[in-house]
Image: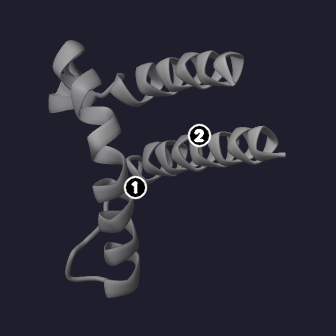
Amino acid sequence: MGRILLRNMVNVFFEIVRYLILIRIIFSFFPVNPYGSPLIFNIVQFIRQLTEPFLAPFRSLVPPLRVGGGGYIDLSPILAIIVLGLVHRLLLGLL
């Protein structure tokens, strides 16, 4: 019984992190004005604060790529989702 609960907790944790990273990816396509809607700005900041500890190590491995016109493409969220999936499967295999 305890093992099933632990597996479920691990599943929920990794799903939440994955969805937060996906939401951060979607938000990155839209500019957020800090002087606009405070609710939206606070939500975006909250998601950034939650996901940054997971993304920072990958960003140091793969820095954002510069594209024409001064923009950047950050591949760290994609790499983080892949590695989190691998760690998730590894942990479930150990449980």
In the displayed image of the protein, which residue is found farthest to the right? 1
Q: Relative to 70, does residue 31 appear above or below in the rendering?
A: below
The part of the image, by quadrant, that contains residue 73 is top left
Say what secondary structure mark 1 lies in: loop
Residue drawn where x is 35% and y is 55% of the image: 50
Question: Left or right: where does residue 66 sit relative to residue 85?
Answer: left
The one of 51 and 4 positioned closer to us in this rendering: 4
Say what secondary structure mark 2 lies in: helix
The colour style of the image is one colour
Label for residue 14?
2
Residue drawn where x is 29% and y is 65% of the image: 45
Q: Mark 2: give few (<14), some (14-19) or many (20+) Cα within 10 Å.
A: some
Residue drawn where x is 32% and y is 76% of the image: 42
The part of the image, by quadrant, that contains residue 31 is bottom left
The part of the image, by quadrant, that contains residue 61 is top left
Q: Relative to 73, does residue 47 appear above or below in the rendering?
A: below
Question: Left or right: where does residue 14 sit relative to residue 77?
Answer: right
Q: Position of residue 26 (x, y in %)?
A: 50, 48
Q: Amino acid at mark 1?
A: Phe
Q: Position of residue 72 (x, y in %)?
A: 23, 29
| CA distance separating discs 2 and 1 | 25 Å
Q: Mark 1: give few (<14), some (14-19) or many (20+) Cα within 10 Å.
A: few
The one of 29 and 4 positioned closer to us in this rendering: 4
Q: Quadrant of the C terminus?
A: top right
Work out whether mark 2 precedes mark 1 in sequence or the reverse, and give the earlier one.
2
Foreground mark, 2 or 1? Answer: 2
**Numbered circles on residues, count:** 2
Label for residue 64?
none
Q: Position of residue 47 (x, y in %)?
A: 39, 59
Q: Position of residue 84 (x, y in %)?
A: 51, 26
Tag 1 residue: 30
